[in-house]
Image: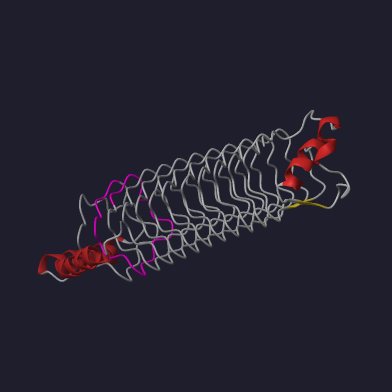
Amino acid sequence: MYDMYAATEKNSKTVQLWDTPVAVEKKQIIQEILKYQGISKDINFASLGGINLSDINLSGVNLSDSILNFVNLSNADLQGVNLNHAELNGTFLTNSKLIDSHLNFANLSNADLEDADLSNSFLNFANLKGANLKGAKLKAAFLNGANLSDSILSFANFNFATLTNAFFGGANLSDAFFCRANLSSAFLSDVNLSDAFLNGANLKGTFLKQSDLRGAFLNGANLNNANLTNAKISFGNLKNADLSFANLSGADLSFANLTGANLSFAILSNVIVEETIFSNNKGISEHTKLILREQGAKFDDFPENMGISTLENLPKSESSTVTC
C-alpha cells in the first residue's frame, strides 16, 4: 500500500540531502568537467548519489555503471545518454529528456519519471518496479523483459513500443497508450488497464488474468492464445480482435463490442455476455451463438426465432468452447 506520509517524509529528506555543502560542491565539480572536457566525454563517476543536477545538460554523456540514487535530474537534458547498468533508485527525472538514451539493465526502482520523454530509448531488462511514469513518453522504446511491477503508468505513451516478456504485475496502466505496441508474452495479470488504448497491439500469449480492461480499446488487437481468465472487459471495444485460442473463462464481456472478432477455439466457459455485441465472428458455431444469446448476448447474424429447443440439432465443430 502506498504510504503518502512516508513518501513525503522521504522526499523531504532527499531535498535536504541535495542542499548539503558536499552535494553543492559535487554539482560544481561536474559543471566544471562538462565545461572543460565537453559533454561528449565519458564521466563514469563511481557515485553521484544525493545531489541536485536539475536542468543540467548531460546529453551524449557516458554514465554507464554510475550510482545516481536519489539524484535530482528533473528537467535535465539526457538525450542519447548511456546509463546502462546505472543505479537510479529513487532518482528524480520528472520532465527530463531521455530521447534515444540507453538504460539497459538500469535500476530505476521507485524513480520519478513523470512526464519524462523516453521516446526511442532502450530499457531492456531495466528495473522500474514502483516507478512513477505517469504521462511519460515511451513511444517506440524497447523494454523487453523490463520489470514494471507496481509502477504508475497512467496516461503514459507506449505506442509502437516493444515490451515482450515485460512484467507489469500490480501496475496502474489506466488511460495508457499501447497502440501497435508489441506486448507478446508479457505478464499483465491483476493490472489496471481500464480505458487504455491497445488498438492494433500484439498481445499474443499475454497473461491478463483478472486484469481490469473495462472500457479499453482493443480494436484489431492480437490476443491469440492470451489468458484472460476472470478479466473485466465490460464496455471494451474488441472489434476485429484476434481472440483465437484465448482463454476467456469467467471473463466479464458485458456491453463489450466483439464485432468481427476471431473466436476460433476460444474458451468462453462461464463468460458474462450481457448486452455483448457479436457480429461477423470467425470460428463461432450456431451452437455457441445460441448459448451466448440465451445468456444475454446480441447477434446481428443469428435468427431471432431460433430457441434453446433446437440446440441438439446445431453443429458444434470448430466452435468456441462454451459450457452452461
Q: Is residue 241 magenta?
A: no
Q: Is residue 79 magenta?
A: yes
Q: Residue at x 53, y 56 (%)?
A: 158
- Region rendered in magenta: 65-87
Q: Is residue 137 left or right of residue 199?
A: left
Asked whether 313 or 175 is in front, the reply is 313
Q: Is residue 198 left or right of residue 281?
A: left
x, y (%) of residue 202? 62, 44
x, y (%) of residue 175? 53, 62
Asked whether 34 or 117 is in front, the reply is 117
Asked whether 243 or 11 is in front, the reply is 243
x, y (%) of residue 213? 56, 54
Residue most extreme to the front: 309
Q: Residue at x 83, y 38 (%)?
A: 309
x, y (%) of residue 320? 72, 35
**Vertical placement of residue 27 versus 197, above or below:** below
